[in-house]
Image (spheres, grey):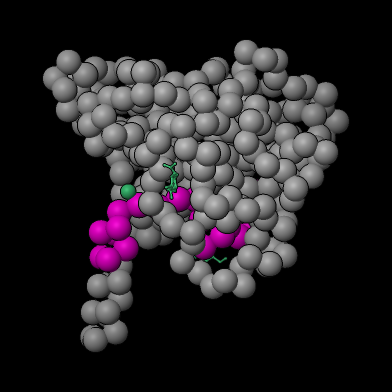
Amino acid sequence: MLQLYFTAVAYLAQLAAAHGGALNYTVGDTWYAGYDPFGPKDQDDAPYIVQRKWITNEPIFETTNASLACNFPGNPARAYIPINAGENITAVYNTWVHTVGPMIAWLTPCANNDCSTFDPAGAEWFKIGQQGLLWGTIEGGGWFQKEFSRWDGSPSLWSERIPETLRAGKYLVRHEIISLHSAHKPQFYPECAHLDVKGSGTGFPTKEFMAKIPGVYSMDQPEINIDVYDPEISTKTEYKIPGPLVWTG
Ligand SMILES: *[C@@H]1O[C@H](CO)[C@@H](O)[C@H](O)[C@H]1NC(C)=O
Ligand SMILES: *[C@@H]1O[C@H](CO)[C@@H](O)[C@H](O)[C@H]1NC(C)=O
Ligand SMILES: *[C@@H]1O[C@H](CO)[C@@H](O)[C@H](O)[C@H]1NC(C)=O
Ligand SMILES: [Cu+2]
């Protein structure tokens, strides 16, 4: 009983912190370990962790923050997720608590084909998939962000396909949730992992699909600097996800 009590309290404390992020990844039936922001320090050198280091699950509030790329501090991982072009990468979350706003998956190629030395500052990213308002209105409708969460701590899954024609190489994949429940105070939750994309494709997106992060968002964009409770906005049934078009290969 006492044990249960403490577990419940710890769980509620975690909920009260009310944030989160991508914790693990899967490709098919294979699991890959993310960096646990509340886990032990020895993760930093762990040869099996595929995700860049992040040390708090607080959101990033500034569209200009350098940590918008790969969270804070964003140190490189040691491992890569092997994946064939055309396969799905699934990001695993748990108890995601926010309900309003889009989710976008991005890639950028690592310079010199080496993500362990790659600094994403100034990198050009492209979208491989995005999820927004599935049904209903902006304020109360079914955003993917709300619908994908299992709410009970069991894995909540978000899958996007690596474009089949994408040329092979090492890439960062960036999973981003943008939460818009605070008026005019967008919250960004990005995490990055290292990918080793295999395949015989030669495709690569052209310039109009590319964006810099930070850079792609600003408080001048009505989709970012938004009050979802404003009656002019709350009842709309469409939300345009900001940024370039998704590149599907
Ligand atoms: C993520 O993987 C770790 C082990 O690496 C595991 O302890 C944890 O439960 C996993 N998280 C989810 C949400 O599946
Ligand atoms: C950027 O975000 C990080 C992580 O949330 C935060 O610690 C830092 O203060 C922010 N930097 C700026 C310049 O706002
Ligand atoms: C792969 O991801 C796409 C895009 O989200 C989705 O439509 C499809 O159902 C996924 N396939 C599997 C097998 O998960
Ligand atoms: Cu939160």
Residue that sits furthest to the left in the current view: 231
The image shows residue 243 at horizontal and vertical percentages of 49, 21
Q: Is residue 13 above or below residue 207?
A: below
Question: On the picture, is 120 further left or further right than 164?
Answer: left
Q: What's the residue at 40%, 36% (across, down)?
A: 62
Q: What's the residue at 43%, 31% (across, down)?
A: 63
The image shows residue 70 at horizontal and vertical percentages of 56, 44
Q: Which residues are magenta?
A: 12-36
Residue 188 magenta-drawn?
A: no
Q: Of residues 48 and 91, which is closer to you in this image?
A: 48
Q: Is residue 79 above or below residue 110?
A: below
Q: How many marks?
A: 0
The quadrant in which residue 209 appears is: top right
Q: What's the residue at 67%, 52% (across, down)?
A: 76
The image shows residue 67 at horizontal and vertical percentages of 51, 43
Q: Is residue 50 above or below residue 171?
A: below
Quadrant that contains the N terminus: bottom left
Q: Is residue 1 above or below residue 165?
A: below
Can residue 83 be seen? no
Residue that sits furthest to the right in the current view: 200
Q: Of residues 113 and 72, which is closer to you in this image?
A: 72
Can residue 66 be seen? yes
Quadrant that contains the C terminus: top right
Q: What's the residue at 64%, 38% (across, down)?
A: 120
The image shows residue 126 at horizontal and vertical percentages of 62, 26
